[in-house]
Every structure is written in structure tokens, then in C-alpha cells.
Amino acid sequence: MLKDKIEKVLLKVQRPSRYIGGELGSVVKDKSKVNVRFAFCFPDSYDVGMSHLGMKILYGLKNLREDFWCERVFAPWEDYEQAMRENDIPLYGLESLDPITEFDFIGFTLQYELSYTNVLNMLDLAGLPVYAKDRGEGTPIVVGGGPCVCNPEPLADFFDLFILGEGEEVNLELMDLYAKMKKEGASKSDFLHEAAKIEGIYVPSFYDVSYNPDGTVQSITPNCPEAKPKITKRIIRDMDKVFYPDSFVVPFTEIVHDRAVVEVLRGCIRGCRFCQAGFIYRPFREKSSDTVCRQTKALCEATGYEEVSLSSLSTSDFSEIEKLLGDLSEYTDKENISLSLPSLRVDNFSEELMEKIRRIRKTGLTFAPEAGTQRLRDVINKNVSDEEIMNTCRMAFEGGASSVKLYFMLGLPTETDEDIIGIGELTDRIIDLYRNVNAGKRSPKLSISVSCATFVPKPFTPFEFEPQASIPEITRKQKLLLDSTNRKIVSVSWHNYRISILEAALARGDRRLSAVIYEAWKSGCKFDSWDECYKYENWVAAFEKCGIDPSFYDNRTRSFDELMPWDHLDYMITKEFLIRENKRAHEGLTTPNCRQKCSACGVIQRIGGGCVGQD
């Protein structure tokens, strides 16, 4: 019956192939032979969610088990949502077309804060109460995972439990426990109490939060024996042995990253002080070059993709990068497969590496100086010098490159007008370099693209204590940047700073923001990361209705001894390290990367052994 309802409305909406399932590589099972069903929900559109590597990994992992069935669920775009509500179509899994209320787990991957209202909207579309306290026995367990779970407190009222860290092992442990207790006829409450004993599982209802008169957190206290004072994230120790899919679901329609993706490493050795991923994904772990090559060939042969991307936070830090590119190029050149190398750094390019990259990508250079002056790059610990930037540009220009894309941030701690003007001065030097390299030649016109994001302070970084720049400050700095650049050659763009201020509030928020998220969703907020959907005024009204000042979360400097809303969650980075790095930032002192010297962040002391990132 549900399938008939779906078919009647599909031709009335954009891109109906988002909503029908049946793609190559999708897994369909006999549900009578399955013990546990898991609805893997990505709280954004199909086009975005189908590009997400984490979903591909966990989808393949869970479906390897004959007794588990994992299905994909995405947020319907506004036209299809309207059709669903008008025709009594509940949110469903793409593989079976069954309502997700029939599943045992509804799991959301929380990749960015601006997806939070979509979580509520998807629960509502499923026909479930959005507040966990209102969902009784017989309703699915609502689970959250992903990077935003390093501070899930703004969503604490809506979820039954959260998974901290990497999911390959803990997801199976959780589902095995559920299968066992389901067979025994246990209650949802009994299951949550047992689940809380698993390392990496956080049940927010098992903790009470109190506040000081000034609004800061006073205490976070367990209220049952199973609740640990600190919940520690899960990590995968051996990247060569961990599961990786040999096939992806291949969509009928174009998606954001429509290609094969192979993960080469996890973590980062760099320690950029603004970068949350660089800290919460520690320690640094690599696959072997042979493993990457084997997985690349398997994926390309199974999916038919003609492009493969190597995924990591810093691909050029892979210790066998030159061997890997040499081995992969033999295969990709022979099979006419395009090889993509995102996340390259300008400070570790050799002539040999550049030559290999020229064979792969000949037209342009993309990198992220993040700041326009050496002083500010030292503050943020970018550890990239002007000389390295210019040397890399020279090698690229000599190899025929004629375009440069540069990524910066505005509003970084200690930033001055000179730092912003420095962005324009850096682009001027790149322009002069291009002209010198190509003097006397018939060369293409140089194109320089400058993209600026507004700095967002994030938990578990040395800048978690810092204020975010106010709207008037960012507006003034954006104008100064425009006035400082050569507009004939340099194009300047920036992310919507009104979205960034909401991201900052949600990133460092506490449980009181659950009410704000609820009110914003009730007023029509969803797809908040999309400029065309973002309703800034609705969010302002939601904060006002709840009696909460967003500047308390955005523009306030935190003291080092303040109890953070996420301090009961252990990502293995010590607070002492973050404080030490914050102080070094304000002194303009850099910290060596992990291969050069261990900075005693706390991770290695926890997992044992020598520093994974060191040679």
C-alpha cells in the first residue's frame, strides 16, 4: 500500500530517483529472517548523504551480517515532504519502502550542526514524538553518531543514546546486545541501562545537569549506577584490518561526490588549533599502500566508477604517498580512471611528488593558508610559511597550472586588520610570480579564487575558549578584504556568516538549546545549511521565545576553569593540553607536528605505545 502511495506522487516532484531505492549495490533482505533492523538516517538531501563515506562503510558492515539489515533514509526535499504529508506517506527505508517506525534502531549521523532541525523533522515525518521522553515502549531506539557527538548536548532531549568515536566495532556490539535482549523480551529502559555499560555509549537521560547563576554549567552528574562519570570515545586500532566495503550503492541520479572513495588514513599529525577534526580523530593511523591499492581496484571494478578519490584529513601526510601514487597511477592510467587527491598541503611537496600530481591534476592548485600573514598562521599553528606557499605555486605554474584556489578564515583569534590586508598582499605576490614564470610565453589568463569562512570555535580544540566575532565585526572585515584585493584577477567569496553564528552557538551549546532547536523547527526551520532555506529571523525568534541570548554561546570568552557542557565526554585530548596550546597561540608560538615531536595531547598516553605519527 505504501509503495502505491509513493508511486502516485513521484512524477510530481523534482528528481524522484532520490526516493525509490533499487540502485546497483543496494541490499534487500527477507525481513522475516532478520533479527535487527537499522534505519541509517542522513539528515540532509539524498545528493549530500549518498556522498558520505561513513554511511557507505557502516551500511556495508551491518549488511554483511545475515541477521542484521541496514537501510538508507534521507531527508526529503521540501516538495516531496509536502507530498508525503498530504498523502499520509511516513518516512521509510529506501531498500524495503517500509516505515522506519517498524525498525529497531533509527540512527542519525550528525556531521554538522546545521542539520539538527532536519533530525526533528525526520522523526516527525516518521510519525514519532521528537522528544525522547515522549517515545514509549515499542518505539525504535534513536541513536546519534558522527563528529557532532563530541558535544551532543543541544540534542540531548531528542536522542535515546549517542555513540562516541569510530563506529565499526561499537555498532555491532550495540546491535548484538539488542538482539539478545529483544529475544529475552527486555524493555527499552533495560536495554539502555545495559547499553550504557558498553565503552563509547552515552545515554543522556542518565545524567543531570545543573547551572550556575551566571548561566555556565555547574555540574554534570550520573543519576544511575550504569552511567560512567566519563564516557570514552571508541577508536579503531588497525586500519589494515578494519572493515572497508568492496562495493558502494551506485545512485541513479547525480550526487555531490559521485565517485569511488578510498580512505587512506585517519587522524592528523598537524595540530591546527582551529580544526576540530584534527583533534577528535586522533590518533594518526594509516593503511598500507598495498591495502589502499587493493581497495581502490575492488571498488572501481564493482561500481564502474571512472573516478576515485583518496580520502583523509591530509593526504600528502601519508607516509607512502609517492609509492602509492606510482602504484595507483599504473592502474588508473590503464583503466582510464581519474584519480582525485583532496587535502594536500603545501609544506611537504617534493619535485617528485609534484610531478606525479601533475599527471593527475594539471590545471590548478587548491590549498588553504587560512590566514594572510605569517604571524596569524603561527597563532593558529598552520605551520605553513610564505616561502613554502610561493615555492608550491612556482612548481605548479611551471607545470602549466593557471588557476589557484585559496581558502581563508575571518575572525580568527588575535586577528588584526593587517592580517586581512595580508590576504590581498599574498594574492598580489602570487600574481607577480605567475607573470614572472610565464614571462615571454603565451600562457592562459591567471585565475585566483579566494574563499573566506567565518571562524567557528569548536569543542576539543585549543580555541574552544575563544569568542566568535560579532556580525558587525565580520561585515567590516569582509569589506576590508574586498578593498584589499585585485578584483580584476581575484574573485572573493564567503560563507553566509549568519549561518556561522548559529553553527557556533549549537557547537558549544548545552541542553537548554534543545528547546531553541524545537521552537526553530516548529516555526519552519530545516535545511539550515542551505542558503536558500535558512531562516535567520526564525532562529532569532526561537532564542527570544526561550529566553536565551545566543551571544552567551557565540561571543563570550570562556575561562580555563569553566566546566564545559561536553567535559563528561572523553575524546582522549586532555584539557590541560588544550589550555597549553591556547596560551601558546596567544604568545604566537607554534607546536611541531606529531612526526617531529610528540606534543603530549593525551591520546598516546591513553592507548599505549609510541606516537603513531612519528617515524
Image (spheres, grey):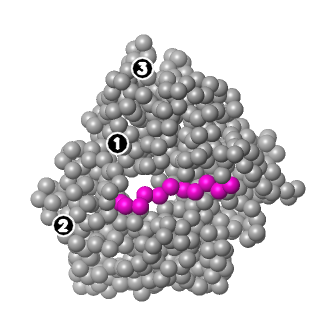
Residue lying furthest front: 184
Q: Nearer the viewer, mark 3 or mark 2?
A: 2
Does 360 appear above or below 80? Answer: below
Mark 2 sits on what residue? 327
Q: Is residue 83 in view from this perspective?
A: no
Q: Nearer the viewer, mark 2 or mark 1?
A: 1
Residue lying furthest right: 213
Mark 1 sits on what residue? 60
Neighbours of disc 2 within 10 Å: few (<14), some (14-19), many (20+): some
Could you tell me the amino acid type at mark 1?
Gly
User: Where's the C terminus, which quadrant?
Assistant: bottom left
Region rendered in magenta: 229-239
* Contact? badges 3 and 2 (CB < 8 Å): no
* Contact? badges 3 and 1 (CB < 8 Å): no
Could you tell me the amino acid type at mark 3?
Ile
Which is nearer the eye, 236 or 529? 236
Q: Earlier in the sequence, mark 3 or mark 2?
A: 3
Locate residue 601, reporting x and y percent. Answer: 56, 73
Which is nearer the eye, 169 or 374? 169
Does 255 appear above or below 410? Answer: above
Mark 3 sits on what residue? 6
Could you tell me the amino acid type at mark 2?
Asp
Q: Is residue 465 in view from this perspective?
A: yes
* Contact? badges 2 and 1 (CB < 8 Å): no
Q: Earlier in the sequence, mark 3 or mark 1?
A: 3
Neighbours of disc 3 within 10 Å: few (<14), some (14-19), many (20+): many
Name the residue: 31% across, 60% down.
Answer: 240
Locate residue 244, reporting x and y percent. Answer: 32, 51
Locate residue 214, reporting x and y percent. Answer: 85, 58
Name the residue: 47% across, 79% down.
Answer: 593
